[in-house]
Image (cartoon, rainbow, N blue to C red):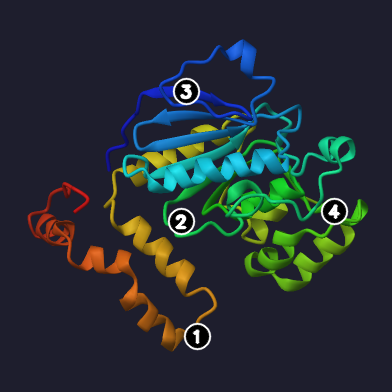
Amino acid sequence: MMNRKFPEKKWWCSKKPAKQETHFNEGDLMAEASFTLNYRGPILEITLSKGKANVISAADSRELNGMWEAFRDNPEQRFAILTGKGEKFFCAGWDLKNVAESGEASDSDYGSGGFGGLNYPRNFNKPVICAVNGIACGGGFEVMLGCDIIVAEEHATFSLPEIKVGVLPDCGVVKLRRRIPYHVAVELMMTGRWMDAEEAKHWGLVNHIVPKGQGLDKAREIAEALADGPPLLYPAIKQVLRMTEMVPENEAFTVHDACSAVEAVNRSEDLKEGALAFTEKREPVWKGN
């Protein structure tokens, strides 16, 4: 399989997002930016970057939701990588300093997909790879749970410490027990204890552990490998997984057959190309139709 390298193109996003064709001065905006975008061919890289801990306020969350929706609707962007600025934090979640100063409520409007945009995004069938480059706690841990493939650097740690500040970990309560054993999830939420990368890997919460500073490289390696694959298959896999998560197995096949992304695969030229390439003993040439 051939892994391609894609050229980079960066943009910085702050509270007032600018059009893509606008160029920013990095030094002027980095302190204010809630996230930065880096375009590498079909791969969109999002780096959380607000403050020292890459925190997210309700306004930041609404902006992230808009970014994820734009990614979802852009046919040229097929994969995303989510990471954090620096080496200490991936994301510390809710911007509690802003909460103390502004009185922002825990049930504020975070956007259509919830906090960070990945709690319950609508019709979101594109793969997201998470490169956890440090502490992932609170809402940052919950944003990570919304990703599909998770790479953790060896020093990464995980926690839902909301219990210590009287906040309910909304997404954690719903999602974490679906990712790891029930009793482990309950203990994490009720005690707020920390989990290191090795334990997270043990419970299947992360896919890969890599040395410090190599998380983004590993995520790029995975994304570039996926980019060489059949374009229609990834949204079909995600759509079926999403639509059948709580459906009994027998009924799930009926849902599977009704999924639009599955129908697109079954009627595609790529399906014919895959079979032809196999019989001709060559690499398939995918066209995405």
Earlier-in-chain disc, 2 versus 1: 2
Q: Which mark is residue 162?
A: 4
- On the image, the x and y values in percent for residue 115 come to 66, 50
Reading the chain from its start, which is encountered first: label 1 or label 3? 3
Q: CA distance from mark 1 to mark 3?
A: 44 Å
Query: Secondary structure beneath disc 1?
Result: loop
Depth check, front residue: 254 or 197: 254
- Residue that mark 1 sits on: 248
Q: Residue 155 versus residue 41: which sits nearer the camera?
A: 41
Q: Report the amino acid beneath label 4.
A: Glu
Residue type, mark 1 in image: Pro
Residue under label 3: 10
Query: Residue 109, position in %: x, y?
Result: 69, 51
Q: Decide: marks 3, 4 in contact (CB < 8 A)?
A: no
Distance of label 4 from label 2 (alpha carbons): 28 Å
Q: Which residue is mark 2?
A: 124
Instruction: Please identify the quarter of the rendering in which residue 53 is found.
Output: top right
